[in-house]
Amino acid sequence: MILRALLLTTFLAAPALASPETDRWEQRKAAVTITRDDFGIPHIKGKTDADAVFGMIYAQAEDDFNRVETNFINAQGRLAETEGEAAIWRDLRMKLFIDPAELKAQYAAAPGWLKAVSAAWADGLNYYLATHPDVKPRVITHFEPWMALSFSEGSIGGDIESISLPQLQGFYTGQKVAQTDIEAGRQLEEPGGSNGMALGPTRSTSGDALLLINPHTSFYFRSEAKVESGQGLDVYGASTWGQFFVYQGFNRHVGWMHTTSGVDNVDEYALTVEKRGGKFAYMFGSQWRPLIEKRIDVPYRAADGSRAVRSFTTWRSHQGPVVRGENGKWIAVQLMHRPVKALEQSFLRTKTSDLASYLKVAERHANSSNATLFASDKGEIAYLHPQFVPVRAPKFDWTKPVDGSDPATDWQGEHSLDQLPSVANPKSGFVFNVNNWPWTAAGPDSKKQADFAPYMDSAGENPRGPNALRLLSGDRKFDLSSLTTTAYDTYLTGFADTLPAVVAAWEALPAGDALKARLAAPVAALKAWDYRSGEASVATSLANFWGAEMVKVHGPAAKAAEVAIVPYLAGKTSGAEKLAGLTAAVDRLAREFGGWDVPWGQINRYQRLTANIAQSYDDRLASVPVGFSSGNWGSLPSFAARPREGTKRWYGDSGNSFVAVVRFGKDGPEARAVHAGGLRGEVTSPHFLDQAVRYATHDLRPVYFTDAQLQGHTERSYRPGE
């Protein structure tokens, strides 16, 4: 805070007291304009890429500095400094990989252009703080350029989050930590990921390529902006708060949509460990190797508000850090960690002009977790598999810990791009991914599973996949309106695959069975249902409550058997168990809502009451009915809702967070979009909730990509600091 106060004093003082930093701020400010459109979305113009980045991040800070700062607090392993002791394990997990000293060294060796935009990024945030003394950072009072490397790709989770926090805590404390409901299988985790579709000229009414951009993330996870520079940057889309590149979006020529992939490129190694000569060592081949020992200090805010520190002795093999124990073995994890290359790839792809230039940027092999759906104004479309895939011996099961003492389990280089199951310009005229396997990505023109190592995909199919394939197959032609309708198709494959057996079990009951009469009306509603969710649908409510009961009871067994929940419920539960689930669902609906026949829209709601990252909910306050449902049951438009503390209604907090459809015409892109709720993080802002009804009703707004499109739709234009 002392440094920030000094900078603020210097900035506001006479020119004679100017510093190099404040001089840079003034130069950047003079080269940037920000224009807010009628939805509050910033359109930034800068003379250089660095100027544009300065304006872009300044606008993000205006919209929601708390989320900007929090992402970088988390990325540097510093959450416990503000959130207290409960966040220690999240910070320790991050610090196993993120070391400020290492990042500073990598930043010093980074390309000059990357250092220039990173410095402008830090300047933009520091200038915002200097000009907004009422904003009180929780932890980071001064941003430094190297910090951009700590959060270099925009995914909702990232590979590090595959490491279990309870298991990490259990290993480093020697105490067993209880599993969460999700880890135990009693509650389904909403699939974090997304939907992406691209259609080629033969499948478009205009003859232009089309792209669906539909990330499924926690709400308010990303900002939205148009960013333009005199050095060729001309991009629109969604950026994760705090990052200076558009993560999912489009420029004048190309568009890209990232979906979480099931590629297996995070590996665990079971280490045989002994203490030898007073130090821990692990067997590798026929020799003992010393484990690298490192002390990690995790500062945290104590209960009384004071600063405290917990120190940990951590260990690492040549494969990676030790993160848990299992059956007497220490488990080390290996994953991609190349911050500079990742940040380069994330920014440079926003300036590409066709598939060839996009793939040239992808040669950095620094996208590990995301598949990409691509389209261009040349009519090109592509499904691109994640570019970071290590070569490994196929004889091992890489979905489980492998023997860390066997040299044959070491990574053996990386697959080249042409060795991946990507597909470009298929005859089918479409590509898609909905966090499912790549083997149906282009329909009949998809790559064949038998031709690739099993580790190319570990996700398999999911309930959204068959629905998306059904909608895109054939020769139907699309425009932006019909692509939007497709994106919001609410057919629930998961219930279509499970509920007929519930009906059959009821029909098989003897005539005198008490359940026959008791469940007659609910079963009739399910039998007549077309498996499409909607606000007025009673069957959707019944199905979701049945699903929740079945997961609570049978989810742990499905997880233990390593069988996905839908096929497990369909094939591994008896008719009596299925009917027991329906009975429990009917009873719960009656208990909580006064009857079993409640329309889904009365239960399933969107509500935004505060600017807090962790929202609170209240049945007594205004909310918006939402007709779509969870992606776990096959809904393409995903809405992850459940009852919250003190509520009976189910409120969503993740799923469809940003939706855009784009046509890549020869005269430039045409697009429509919607943001969950609104862009601004201030409750008093007109743009806090101005898109809520549009979000729930699929009413996408026009995107103003060009100056001509923006004309007549502006609220104000200004320079940063004005």
Image (spheres, rainbow, N blue to C red):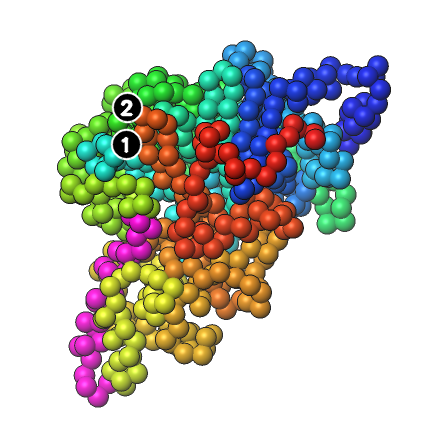
Viewer-closest of 56 and 463: 56
Which residues fall within the magenta stretch? 485-513
Instruction: Determine which residue is flagged by label 2.
Output: 378
Element type at marker 2? loop
Residue 503: x percent and y percent?
22, 71
**Which residue is drawn at the image coordinates 23% and 59% (left, top)?**
497
The residue sitting at the bottom extreme is 512
> Is residue 640 within the magenta segment?
no
**Towards the viewer: 65 or 236:** 236
Quadrant location of the N terminus in the rendered image: top right
Q: Is residue 606 above or below residue 482?
A: below
**In front of the other: 305 or 259:** 259
Residue placed at 47% from the left, 55% from the top?
Answer: 693
For disc 1, the neighbor class at 10 Å (few under 14, some 14 to 19, many from 20) is many
Helix, strand or loop under label 1: strand
Residues under labels 2 and 1: Cα distance?
Answer: 8 Å
Mark 2 and 1 residues: CB-CB less than 8 Å, in contact? yes
Based on the displayed image, in which of its 4 quarters is residue 555 positioned?
bottom left
The residue positioned farthest toward the front in the image shown? 712
Which residue corresponds to the image point at 49% horizontal and 57% vertical from the top-left? 606
Could you tell me which residue is drawn at 19 percent across and 86 percent down?
511
Which three-letter amino acid code belongs to the residue tagged 2?
Lys
Mark nearer the N terminus (2 vs 1): 1
